Image (cartoon, helix red, strand yellow):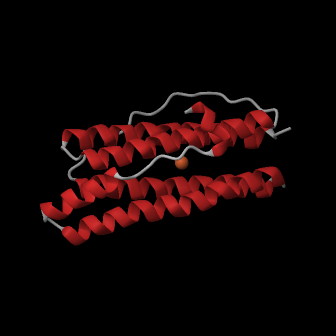
Amino acid sequence: MIKKSVQDAINKQINAEIYSSYMYYSMAFWFESQNLAGFAHWMRIQALEELMHAQKFAGFVTERGGRVLMAAVDKPPTEWKSPLHCVEEVYKHECKVTALINGLMDLALKEKDHASVSFFNWFIDEQVEEEAGADAIVQKLKLMKDHNGGLFMLDRELDARTFTPLPEIAGAF
Ligand code: FE
């Protein structure tokens, strides 16, 4: 049985993951409005991945006899100054999420909840990828500065991203 303190903390994290998904959809629709369909595609996949994270957390709580409780989701931003500004916000957001996941791990260690420690490890590793993925796009945008040719090439590259559902929740997609 999961401890209430850990259950409550995971419920908060589920809300944060769903907010992340909502924010990435908002970014996707902004990129659509900027005629950058590849960036929009990348953001939509990002949004789906965040929903998967929420479901992965929810599955763990349920499996351990806890209860998943939904709360209100904050309104995400809807406008960004430029593609670079938007992707910089992605990077900053993922750094914040990393801090939240680290907080969950600290709690699991404090509670000597080894099952949660093991489960949260997946998310610790995932955040390394999330930060690196966003930073790679930021660096490319900085390199190309105002060269639109580079922007169109990057848009095409991002359009090639594929979505792979996690095996444990593949049936949900
Ligand atoms: Fe996530």
User: Residue at the spot x=44%, y=46% of the render?
Assistant: 46
Asked whether, in this view, residue 43 is left or right of residue 172, the answer is left
Asked whether, in this view, residue 36 is left or right of residue 88, the answer is left
Residue 19 spot, x, y in % from top left: 48, 38
Where's the N terminus, which quadrant?
Answer: top right
In front of the other: 169 or 119: 169
User: Residue at the spot x=30%, y=52% of the render?
Assistant: 86
User: Residue at the spot x=40%, y=60% of the render?
Assistant: 134
Q: Quadrant of residue 47?
A: top left
Q: Is residue 113 visible?
A: no
Residue 28 spot, x, y in % from top left: 32, 41
Q: Quadrant of residue 149?
A: bottom left
Q: Is residue 107 above or below residue 40?
A: below
Residue 31 spot, x, y in % from top left: 25, 44
Q: Quadrant of residue 85?
A: bottom left
Where's the C terminus, which quadrant?
Answer: top right
Q: Is residue 94 above or below residue 24?
A: below
Q: Is residue 59 above or below residue 97?
A: above
User: Residue at the spot x=51%, y=28% of the render?
Assistant: 72
Residue 118 spot, x, y in % from top left: 76, 56
Q: Is residue 152 visible?
A: yes
